[in-house]
Amino acid sequence: MASTTFSGPVTSTNGFIGNLTGTVTGTVAVTTLTAAGSVTAAQSGTTFVLSSATEFATTLPAPAAGLVYTFIVGAAPSGANYTIVTASSANIIKGQAYPASGDAGDTGTADDTISFVSAAAVAGDSVTVFSDGTSWFAKGFCAVATGITFTQAS
């Protein structure tokens, strides 16, 4: 996990005022993806920014307890979808998309593909996936109901 060193005045909510020097931990790695590829178990905890003129698929590793990744649209897809797919097309994604529009979003119960849909997903739409060792659990946030979909390609 990355860390940042800081120094300077601090005011807390309980009225403490003083100077503090130390290290902030808990920041996450951020990687921009611009082409098709696979993420690895070693990249667990990473936030991936999807940013390309030509959309692509990103393949998740085999499920392992505690693996977690976040995918954020950096450049809105146009012409094709950004997709997040399971290894070997395993139908093990379960999750929901929550649109800011207030409309009902898509859900998945036994799927192998999460799509950021072309002409619907916008910069800032995101999905976080977490594995319990057997399945991938997904929680997505999008601007419109059709921005994120869960499907079974095979």
Image (cartoon, rainbow, N blue to C red):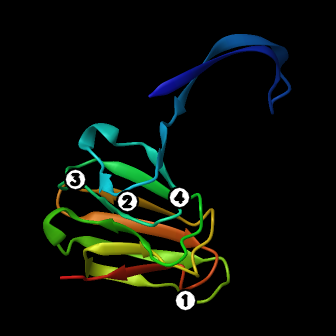
Amino acid type, mark 4? Ile
For residue 72, which numbered disc appears in the image?
4
- Name above or below for residue 97 compared with residue 26: below
Helix, strand or loop under label 1: loop
Q: CA distance from mark 1 to mark 2?
A: 20 Å
Residue under the image location 28 percent in, 63 percent down: 136
Tag 3 and tag 2, C-beta contact below 8 Å: no
Q: CA distance from mark 4 to mark 1?
A: 20 Å
Q: Earlier in the sequence, mark 3 or mark 1?
A: 3
The quadrant in which residue 59 appears is: bottom left
Q: Earlier in the sequence, mark 3 or mark 2?
A: 3
In the rendered image, residue 7, in percent from the top left (x then y), is placed at 74, 12
Q: Earlier in the sequence, mark 1 or mark 2?
A: 1
Left or right: residue 142 compared with residue 39: right
Residue lying farthest to the bottom in this orientation? 103
* Camera-side mark, 3 or 2: 3
In the rendered image, residue 118, in percent from the top left (x then y), is placed at 52, 79
Q: CA distance from mark 3 to mark 4?
A: 18 Å
Amino acid type, mark 2? Val
Residue under the image location 21 percent in, 71 percent down: 92
The quadrant in which residue 141 appears is: bottom right
In-front residue for pair 26/39? 39
